[in-house]
Amino acid sequence: MSGEAGGGELRGIGARLRAAREKRGLTLLQAAERLHVDAYIVQALEREEFAALGADVYVRGHLRRYAEAVGESPTQLQQLYSASPHAARPDLTRIPRGEPDHRGSRLMPPALLLVVGFAAAGLLWWLLTLPGEKARPLPVESGAPPVLIAPAPDAGGAEHASAAGAGAAPQRPGASPPTSSRVPIAGGVAAQARLDMSFSATSWVEVSDAEGRQLLHGLIEAGSTRTLTGTAPLLVVLGNAPGVTLRFNGAPMTPGVLVRRDGSAHLLIDADGRVSTAAARLAHGD
């Protein structure tokens, strides 16, 4: 494993490492502690039992660190190791190679055809169904009687109401008072209705007409106004009803009792100005 030349020069790797360690006064254990390795690694290097150290890259790493620790030349020892029969070269011809899997290549074309077929069928369905769909008029929520919203009274309207009340027949005892009155529409009932909206506060708004057209949709900021025209009945959804002023065909109206506790309102306004509560699920387009 180790030898000496005629001049007494140490030629072997293990002999040079051992001589350098002893020259520094280190034992095997002390050298192992300095290298932070087990003692058997130091012993294997000095005995040139490189097979016990694993792969070639590990042997070279231990050899370089040991040489630096005891003051030997890492370059010379690496050259000696490369020239020694202990430095085994990897046999690349024996690297196992897996057999090519032809099953995957055979399955690829049918899988691609299947994916393309599904995509074409979905596109055809979309082209045939979506363009022909139309939103249908939304009915009033079942069980909720229509409620008529009275217009905001003005100076002349108060006198008219007083005169009308004087000539009205007295109400029978126990009869329920009327919940609302009809909104007068200028020019009579028309298929096309106009809705004017003024926003004193920011509110979410959705407005659709009887033909399913969406006339307005989105968050409208305070100070804005909108004028919408569509076929009655109109479906009106207000997220902040107290902050929105409505005029239907020029007649002002207030949601009043139709406003929910959270401030929202779902209204259905017919061509005569009658306003009723729309179902919440219908108002959101479900």
Image: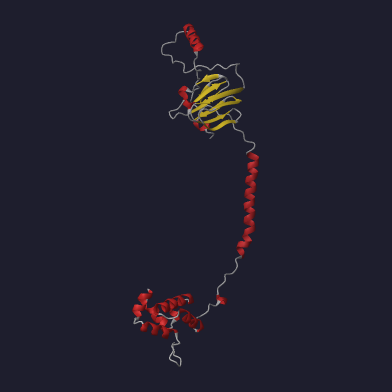
Q: Is residue 26 left or right of residue 106?
A: left
State the residue at coordinates (49%, 9%): 159
Q: Is residue 201 above or below residue 151?
A: below
Q: Residue furthest bottom?
A: 6
Q: Position of residue 223 (x, y in %)?
A: 51, 27
Give x and y (percent) for residue 84: 49, 84
Image coordinates for residue 12, horizontal then vertical, percent: 45, 86
The mark tally for this picture is 0
Does residue 41 appear to the left or right of 160 in the view shown? left
Q: Is residue 73 left or right of residue 207?
A: left
Q: Is residue 37 visible?
A: no
Picture coordinates of residue 118, whole percent (x, y):
62, 49
Q: Quadrant of the N terminus?
A: bottom left
Q: Which residue is at 57% across, 19% downward? A: 250
What residue do we see at 54% from left, 25% from top? 197
Along the viewing direction, whichever of 144 and 190 lies nearer the viewer: 190
Decide which of 101, 187 is in the foreground and name it: 187
* Residue 34 versus residue 142 in the image, above or below: below
Frontmost residue, 250 versus 172: 250
Q: Relative to 153, does residue 216 appear above or below in the rendering?
A: below
Q: Is residue 108 positioned above or below 128 on the image?
A: below
